[in-house]
Image (cartoon, rainbow, N blue to C red):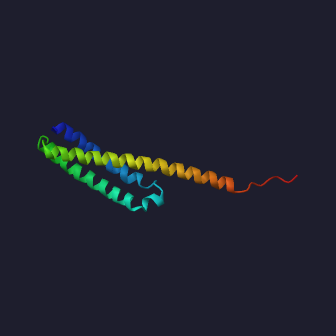
C-alpha cells in the first residue's frame, strides 16, 4: 500500500464515520436499543478512528507493507460492512414506518357524509 492509497483511505474514513453517526438519527428506536446495534456502532466508530490514524501515519511514512497494510484493509472492510448495515437498517426503518402508517389509516374509521 503506497502513500496515495493511504491518502484516499484517509479521506474515506471520515466520510463513513459522519454517515454512520448522522444516519443513526433516522433508525427506528427499537433497533437502536438492541445490544448488537450498539456494539456495531461503537465498533464502527472505533475502526474508523483507528483507520484514520493509521492512514495519516501511512501518508507521512510513504505507505505500509505487510501486516500494517493488512490491518488497514481489515479496518476499511469493517467500516464498509457497517456502513452497508446502516443503509439496510435505514431502509428497513422506512418500510416499517410506511407499514405502520398504512395500518393506522386502515384502522381509523372514515366519516361518511349524512344524506
- Measured as percent of width and height from the top left, residue 108 is found at 70, 57
Towards the viewer: 30 or 49:
30
- Measured as percent of width and height from the top left, residue 10 is found at 23, 44
Locate the N terminus and report the quarter of the image it occupies.
Answer: top left
Residue found 53% across the figure and 48% down from its top: 95
Residue found 32% across the figure and 45% down from its top: 80
- Residue 54 is left or right of residue 109, and the answer is left
Residue found 30% across the figure and 56% down from its top: 43
- Measured as percent of width and height from the top left, residue 76 is found at 26, 45
Towards the viewer: 35 or 90:
35
| Count of numbered tags | 0
Q: Is residue 36 visible?
A: yes
Residue found 36% across the figure and 51% down from its top: 20
For residue 40, above or below residue 60: below
Q: Is residue 15 visible?
A: no
For residue 62, above or below residue 97: above
Asked where in the image residue 61 lies, by quadrant, the reply is: top left
- Measured as percent of width and height from the top left, residue 49 is found at 25, 53
- Residue 64 is left or right of residue 29, and the answer is left
Amino acid at each position: 500500500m503506497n502513500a496515495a492509497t493511504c491518502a484516499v483511505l484517509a479521506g474515506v474514513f471520515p466520510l463513513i464515520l459522519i454517515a454512520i453517526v448522522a444516519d443513526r438519527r433516522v433508525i427506528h428506536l427499537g433497533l437502536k436499543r438492541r445490544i448488537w446495534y450498539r456494539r456495531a456502532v461503537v465498533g464502527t466508530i472505533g475502526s474508523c478512528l483507528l483507520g484514520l490514524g493509521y492512514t495519516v501515519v501511512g501518508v507521512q511514512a510513504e505507505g505500509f507493507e505487510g501486516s500494517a497494510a493488512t490491518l488497514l484493509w481489515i479496518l476499511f472492510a469493517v467500516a464498509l460492512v457497517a456502513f452497508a448495515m446502516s443503509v439496510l437498517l435505514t431502509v428497513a426503518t422506512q418500510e416499517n414506518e410506511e407499514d405502520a402508517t398504512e395500518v393506522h389509516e386502515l384502522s381509523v374509521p372514515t366519516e361518511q357524509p349524512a344524506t
